[in-house]
Image (tube, helix red, strand yellow):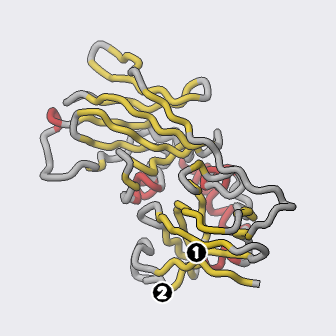
Amino acid sequence: MKKVIRVLFIICVSWLISGCKSVPDVRKVYDGPVKQSEELSYLFMVGEGSFPVNIFKIDGKNCTDTALLWNGSFQGKWGGFNVALLPGSHSFEFAMLEENYVEIVTFNMEAGIKYEFRIENNGIMIYRKSADGETAVDVKHNRLSPYKEPEISSPHGTLIQSEETEKEGSFSIIRLDGLAGSKKPSFYEYNKYVASGNYELMLTPGKHVLEFSAFINKNGKYYVSREVYSREVKIEAGKKYKFRISNLNETATDFTVANIEFVSFK
């Protein structure tokens, strides 16, 4: 794990030293044939070499674009994104990597207009860009309530991410039963505290729906999920559980074809 930390640190520092602030290439996130630029609306965030925010859902659908899910890192422009959509009202679900919350923002987008995403005063702001300058956009905010773990004295099972289990994959909980992933195991917590990312998440007995992203280091090569996975799991009191990746296609750049299992262990 220490080697991984050193590699990530070197990459991030090198990127920051370069002094570059850039916007990744435009990603098409609308259905149908390619449109002319004046027929589209754009939302972008300037990349600054860190991971302050990731897009996990657009208009209620899980993001399936690696460059957006992993915040432009596949384009060498970490921390930014740039999406093209058809004009109209759109909602974006963001996981705030440093502030530890998940928020959905909804606003109307005009054809031929670019909008900039910024984090200001601990909140999300959207600006409409034009030749005359920029104006703040009226945005509807919906910050998801966090999942609350049961008391340790109450019946529960435990989902575990540890140095041992990460050999079979690292899994970052984004949503749990429709709520924001709790602080300890969340994706943004993992990126904030790169040293570990380990967690123990207590779950009440019964069925739960987990939404998560994942990656694995296999023989020195990283494989990352192309989408946010959703799984319904059944928890029994007193048992320990983990996710694990199997049947990894090591010739691919992601493991969408791999099997992700949820298993109990001792």
Rendering coords of residue 80 (x, y %): 45, 43
Q: In the image, what residue occupies the spot 82% across and 61% down?
A: 154
Disc 1 is placed on an element classified as strand
Q: Which disc number belongs to residue 217?
A: 1
Q: Quadrant of the C terminus?
A: bottom right
Residue 215 vertical placement versus 35 (above, below)? below
Q: CA distance from mark 2 to mark 1?
A: 14 Å
Amino acid carrying mark 2 in the image = Asn
Q: Secondary structure at mark 2?
A: loop
Can you tell which quarter of the image residue 167 is in? bottom right
Inspect this view and state whether residue 99 appears. Answer: yes
Seen in the picture, residue 169 relative to 139 is either above or below; the reply is below
Label 1 is placed on what type of residue? Asn
Residue ID at (66%, 75%): 242
At a point 25% along the width and 34% down the height, the residue shown is 41
Asked if one can make out residue 161 in the rendered structure from this viewpoint, the answer is: no
Mark 2 highlights which residue?
247
- Asked if residue 118 lies left or right of residue 39, the reply is right
- Please tell me which of labels 2 and 1 falls first in the chain: 1
Q: Residue furthest right?
A: 153
Q: Position of residue 19 (x, y in %)?
A: 52, 38
Res 202 label? none
Location of residue 79 with respect to 128 vertically, above or below:
below
